[in-house]
Image (tube, rainbow, N blue to C red):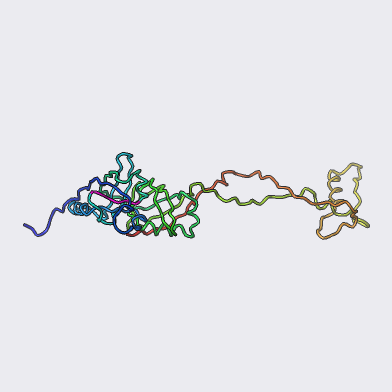
Amino acid sequence: MFGFNMFPEIPRPFDATYQCFSVAMLPGNERQDVERGGKIIMPPSALEKLTRLNINYPMLFKLTNKKSKRETHSGVLEFVADEGKIYLPLWMMHNMNLDEGDLVQIESVSLPVGTFSRFQPLSSDFLDITNPTAVLENCLRSFACLTKGDIIAVQYNQKVYELLVLETKPGDAISIIECDMNVEFAAPVGYQEPEVPKKRDEEMVLDPSDLMPEPSGFVAFKGAGNRLDGKKRKDSSSADQGASKPVYVRGIPDYDYQIGTLRFIRQTAKPKNNENPENDEFKPFSGTGFSLRART
C-alpha cells in the first residue's frame, strides 16, 4: 500500500561452517596480500546469504575452532573461494590450531571501535627496524579487527615478524576500520637492556698535601700561643696541625725528591649507600605510543 517500508528489516545473524585452508592452497595466482593482513576469503554463496540477512557493514566475523575452543575475529577480503571452503592467512590458522581441511564455524559479529592496543614483539629483531611504529601502522591497514591473545604476522623487507596482541580496548576484540587508536609496545621476548657503565664516586687514598715539601725558611705565625693561667687551649692541637700542614697546589715539584722513592696517588671506588635496586628495573617502552589511523 505504501511505496516505502515503514518497518526496516532487522539484521539477522550469519552462522555457517566451512572447511578452512591456507592461502597457499587457493587456486590461481599467489595471493600475498591475504597473508599480509587479517582478512579471509569466502565463497560467493556466503555473500548472497549475508545480503539476504541484511548484515551491517563492515562485515566482521568470529571464527571458532570447536575442537580446541580457540577463537579469533576477522574481516572478509573477497568472495571468490570454492563452495564450502574458506581461505585464511597462515598466522590465523596457527592461532586457532587448525590444519588443512579442518572445520571452522563462522558467525557475524559487531565489534566496538578500538581506542587502544598494546603489542609485544616475539623477537628482539623487531627493534632493528628503523621505524617500527610506522611499519606496524602500515601493516594494520590490512586488518579489520584485533583480538587479544592473537599473534599477528608483520612482513617487512622480506622478513616476517610476529607480534603478540597483549591488550585491546574497549574490549578483548575490537574493530580498527576508520579509527584513531593509540598503540604501545612492550619489551620484546628475551630482550635485555644494554649495560651502561656507571660512573664511580672516587676518592683519594693519599692526601696530595702529604706530598708537598715541608716549608723552609721564615714561616709567619709559626709559633704556638700560651694562656696566661698556664692551661692549654682546647683548639691548640687542631690549630697546630692545620698550621703545620701545607696547602696542596698542583704544578709545584718536590725539591726534596730522592731517587727510588716514587709515590703515586691512587683512586678507589666509593660505595654508594643510597642505591635503590628498584630504580634500575627496566620498564619497557613506558609511556610511549602513537595515533594510528587504519583504513581499508
Q: Nearer the viewer, residue 224 or 92?
A: 92
Q: Nearer the viewer, residue 62 or 31?
A: 31
Q: Residue at x 13, y 55 (%)?
A: 6
Residue 221 in view, yes or no: no
From which residue to which does the magenta span run?
84-89
Q: Nearer the viewer, residue 152 or 103?
A: 103
Residue 55: x, y in percent?
Answer: 22, 52
Where residue 272 sits, quadrant-wise, is top right
Image position of 289 (left or right of 263): left
Q: Residue at x 17, y 53 (%)?
A: 52
Q: Residue at x 92, y 42 (%)?
A: 230
Residue 170: x, y in percent?
Answer: 35, 49
Residue 96: x, y in percent?
Answer: 34, 44
Residue lying furthest right: 217
Magenta stretch: includes residue 88: yes
Magenta stretch: includes residue 185: no
Residue 121 in view, yes or no: yes
Image quarter where the C terminus lies is: bottom left
Asked if residue 109 is positioned above or below residue 250 in the image, the reply reads above
The secondary structure that dominates the magenta segment is: strand
Image position of 8 (left or right of 98): left
Image quarter where the N terminus lies is: bottom left
